[in-house]
Image (spheres, rainbow, N blue to C red):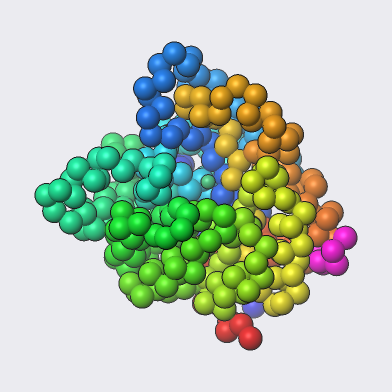
Amino acid sequence: MTTPSTTTIATADGETSADRLGRTLMHEHLVIGYPGWESHTSVPKASAEDEIAICVDRIQELQDLGYSSLLDPCPNDLGRDVELAAKVAQKTGFQIILATGLYKQAEGGVPYWHFRSNFAPQVDPMAELFIAELTEGIGESGIKAGIIKVATGIGEISEYERTILLAAAKASAETGAPITTHTDDGSLGDHQQRILTEAGVPAHRIIIGHSCGTDDHDYHMGLARGGSYLGFDRFGIDAIFPDEKRVSSLAKMIRAGAGDRLVVSHDSVWCWKGQPFPPGVLENFGGDAFDPTFFERKIIPKLRDAGISAEEIERLVVDNPRRFFEGEKLATLA
Ligand SMILES: [Zn+2]
């Protein structure tokens, strides 16, 4: 039996609660702009109206499929646009959860924080920023973040990325907010989990994102046994890692008993600031890339073919997001 949730979650348009999330995609983006996009002034800027229209269209497609919520874990330094999210939420009634946080060393807003670090350590100032955005609001908007985003790159976690992880842990301890992460190539999630839990974050308050960038079952099970959620959240981006392997490794996790700690999504991006992909590049990603309906239309049938029940699939999109935001503790996994 589940008791009604009292956990409130900040969205782009007011508060909701975990039990009102419904079908939820846990990693999609209304807009992304890599730091420095402003310098590319020769690329025409989309109007706010055009961006709203694009996002509303995508959301209506999701609503037609029975979805009612998404998490847009765009960090502060990646073109986050909370006013856009608020307008889209108001027009559609869709629940959009926003993030506070900072992106990885290679593609984040590093110079600013690096400059500040010449004078003082930055863990506390970053934590104060995250706490302010979670409890008071983002800038002057009055819109609060509902989760903290952290990110790491390839090879090893840099000092800068570690600073962000420690700041996120501090902000999470202070506010109770959960954390979602970016990993590259399905790697270093175990390091993220260790740094965050050693800094006091309960493992079940963490989603190790982009875990579907590898089909290393031992890596996956290590994270699951560590008690965190895993994001299989890049369905459709076959150009980075084959969807076929995402499906088979997800099915393998469910068969191994980890179906209660997996969330799904596409990491789709609906509007770009600047032109991060030179002409012709995105076309090679294939038609399913960045389509937030892809899991529902094309992946669910493949999971069914792999012997995964409708109930197990429903758990991925309804129960697991709810339990994650509620902060329900996960059972010990054999
Ligand atoms: Zn993303």
Locate the C terminus and report the quarter of the image it occupies.
bottom right
Front position in the image: 35 or 157: 157
Image coordinates of residue 77 in percent, x first then y, are 37, 40
- Tell me: residue 7, above or below residue 265: below
Using the rendered image of the protein, determine whether residue 11 is visible from the camera's viewpoint.
no
Relative placement, left or right, of 90 versus 150 is right
Check residue 309 for magenta coloring. Answer: yes
Residue at image coords 33%, 37%: 141
Residue at image coords 11%, 49%: 119
- Tell me: residue 229, above or below residue 282: below
Query: What is the count of numbered marks?
Result: 0
Relative placement, left or right, of 250 versus 328 is right
Residue at image coords 66%, 70%: 217
Task: Magenta stretch: give its range.
Answer: 305-310
Q: Main secondary structure of the magenta part?
A: loop
Image coordinates of residue 272 in percent, x first then y, are 52, 29
Quadrant in which residue 58 is drawn: top right
- The outermost residue toward the front is 155
Check residue 141 for magenta coloring. Answer: no
Front position in the image: 228 or 18: 228
Front position in the image: 23 or 79: 79
Locate the N terminus and report the quarter of the image it occupies.
bottom right
Residue at image coords 33%, 72%: 199
Front position in the image: 209 or 119: 119
Using the rendered image of the protein, determine whether residue 169 is visible from the camera's viewpoint.
yes
- The outermost residue toward the left is 119
Image coordinates of residue 275 in percent, x first then y, are 51, 24
Relative placement, left or right, of 116 versus 311 is left
Image coordinates of residue 219 in percent, x first then y, are 59, 70
- Tell me: residue 6, above or below residue 55: below
